[in-house]
Image: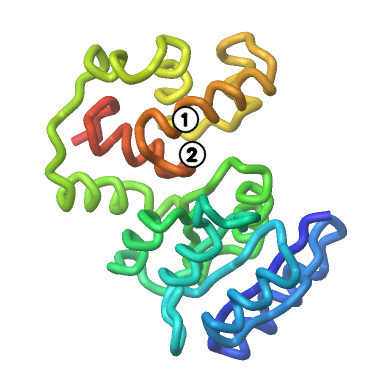
Amino acid sequence: MIRVLIADDQGLVRAGLAALLGAEPDLEVVGTAADGDQAVEMARELSPDVACVDVRMPGRDGISVTKELCDPAAERQVPVLILTTFAIDDYVFAALEAGASGFMLKDSEPADILAAVRSVAAGNGTLDGSLTRMVIREFSRRRQAQPVTVAQGSELLSPRELDILLLLAQGMSNEDIARELVLEVSTVKSHISRMLPKIGVRSRLQAVVWAYQHRVVEVDG
């Protein structure tokens, strides 16, 4: 059972998400919060598997909540799925830097939101398809990092880690990568766990952005 906390200042959104998630046999809504402070308090008390967090809330906003819940120093980190109304929003990029595991637009199809919650809970992360290219391009523009080629990237990563990073950038899951490279899923997970701190990121989603940002993977066009 995947235990979910919902944090949104709009009552209609909270109720809609709670109804959507609660109707699924493998999902349980353990709490709903109307603002960021309440979200952090409830997350500490309830220890959900996923927190669905709005980026704009009164008081403590979604960025602050994400930093708190994803803090590596926290006793128990809570994966965060950011829900946003806007296709491009400063909050989205700040939340990614804060450690968010995924982003979805609030007007996404219900099936896509359900899939995103399950993906984040499984440690895979997710990004709304309509946001992918814009997020990658915006990070590339904002962070004028020194380009890193695949060959240079191998100085940071082992050949197998680099293979896995390139497949992550194609949107593959752990299971997909395991089949592609003829590995056990547990082996793929171990490689990813070792890879993330090497490139200074916290999540699979951030690793993919890092790969595009540093031109280990090129953005078409």
In the picture, measured across the screen, residue 194 lies left or right of residue 22, that is: left
Task: Please name whichever residue, 76 or 139, is drawn nearer the observer in this view of the structure.
Answer: 76
Q: Residues within 10 Å of mark 2 (few under 14, many from 20)?
A: many
Q: Name the residue tied to disc 1.
A: 168
Identify the residue position indicated by label 2 in the image.
204
C-beta proximity under 8 Å, tags 2 and 1: yes
Please, what is the three-letter code of the amino acid marked with disc 1? Leu
Pick the front one: 61 or 24: 61
The spot of residue 14 in percent (x, y) is 64, 82
Specify the quadrant of the image occupied by residue 150. Answer: top left
In the rendered view of the protein, which quadrant contains the N terminus? bottom right
164 over 5 or under it: above or below: above
Q: Residues within 10 Å of mark 1 (few under 14, many from 20)?
A: many
Residue at 56% x, 11% y is 181
Horizontal relation, residue 83 to residue 210: left or right? right
Residue drawn at 57 percent across, 57 percent down: 74
Residue 157 in which image quadrant: top left
